[in-house]
Amino acid sequence: MLGPAVRSLLRLRRATLWAGVAVGAGTLAGLIGPAWIGRQEAIDEARARGALLAQVLESDASRTIETASLSLHAIGDGLTRTVADPHEAQHLEEHFSHVLVGLPFIRSVSLLDTRGRVLISTNADEIGLEIPLDDFGRLPAPDRDLLLPLRPGRGLADLAKGRAARGSPVGMLPLLLQLSPSPDAPASGASAPVGISPGTRERDPRWLLALINPDALTQVQQRALPTGRSAAWLASTDGQLLAAMETLHQLPGQRLDGHPAFDGLRRGREHDTYIGAGALPGEVIVAYRAAPRRPLMVGVEQSMDEVLARWHAGLRWLLLIGALALALIALATITVRRSLQARAEAVEALEGAHEQLADRERDMRVLSRACRR
C-alpha cells in the first residue's frame, strides 16, 4: 500500500500533466487569437481598399463619359448657331479640327445626317462613310445622348456598312447625340453648312457621334491597382465588359453573365463588397459600384491569396514561435513528471526499507524474549 507521501507525489505528477496541457492550450490560444485577428484585419483592409478603388474608378469613368457628353452638347450648340447664321458655316470644318484638343480619350467626333452619312469628322478619311444607325438599336431623343454598347474596331470605318471588324482585339465606345433642330433653320439647302449637300432638310435629325477609347479607362485601372493577381473592370449594367486589366481572362465585349455583382445590383444594392466568386478564378474580395447617371458598373477584385500573402508570411514565424514554445512546455512537463516519478519511487523504496527494518526489529524483539525464557 502506498504511503501518504507517495500518493501526494503521484497526485502532483498528474497535476503537472494537466498544468502542462493548460499552459499549452493557453499558449495556443494566445497565438491563434492574434493570428485570426490579423487575418480579419487584412481582409477588412482589402475590402475597404477595394471599395475606395471602385469609387475612384467609377468616378473617373463617369467623369470621362460626362466630359465627352458635355463636349458633344457644346459642339451641337455650335452647329445649331452655324445653321442659324450662314456666315459662320465656313468656319465649321475649322471648328471640328480643334474638337479633340484636351480630349485624348476620344478617337473621333463626326457629324452624321439622317441616313448615317458622315458629313464632317475630325478624321478627314471618314467623311462620306455611311454608318447604319439601325444597328445601334435604340437611339437617343433630340438633344439627348446615349452611350452605346462596345463595338469592335478603332474608327468609323469599322462601323460602316460592310466593314464590320468582328473579332478585333481593339474596341470603341460610341456616344451618340441627336441634335435638336434649330427653330430658325432654313427650308432649303442654299445656306447649308459646309459638308451638307444642297437639298438637305435641316428639320431632319442629325447626329453627333463620338468614339471613346476604352483603353484610356484601362490605363487608369492599371495605375490604380498594383501588379499582381488583382483586377479592375468596367462593364455595362447588362453585363457587357467594356474595359478591363490584362489580369482578367475575359476580353472587352464579352459578357460577365452570372457574376454575383450584377445579381446584387438587380436586388437594389448599387455598391457593395463581398467575399466569394468573381471574374477572377478562385476566392476573391469583390467591390463594385454602379454609376449614378450612366448604365455603367465598376468592379475591383482582389485575390484572397494575394491579400493574405503578407499574413501568411507572418503566420510562418508565428507557427515557428508557437512550436518552439509548445516544445519547451512539453519538455518542462516531461522533466517535472519524471522528477516527481523518480521521487515517488525513491520515497516508496525508502518507505519499503523502513517497513522491512521495522519488521526485522519486531522479529528481533520476539526472538530476544524467547531466548530469555
Image: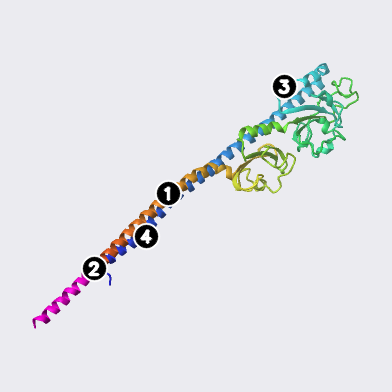
Q: Earlier in the sequence, mark 3 or mark 4?
A: 4
What residue is shown at x 73% (from left), y 42% (from top)?
240
Three-letter amino acid code at disc 1?
Leu
Q: Which of 303 and 327 is in front in this view?
A: 327
Q: Which of 199 and 250 is in front in this view?
A: 250
Q: Quadrant of residue 224?
A: top right
Which residue lies under the disc numbered 4?
18
**Residue 311, image x and y in percent?**
51, 43
Q: In which quarter of the image is residue 368?
A: bottom left
Q: Nearer the viewer, residue 191 or 154?
A: 154
Which residue lies under the disc numbered 1?
324
Query: Looking at the rendering, in which quadrant would you find the N terminus?
Result: bottom left
Which residue lies under the disc numbered 2?
351
Gap in Å between the C-alphas at discs 1 and 3? 67 Å
Gap in Å between the C-alphas at discs 1 and 4? 19 Å
> Mark 1 touching mark 3, by CB under 8 A?
no
Label 1: how many residues lie within 10 Å, few (<14), some (14-19) or many (20+)?
A: few
Left or right, 51 with reference to 37: right
**SS for tag 4?**
helix
Q: In which quarter of the image is residue 99?
A: top right
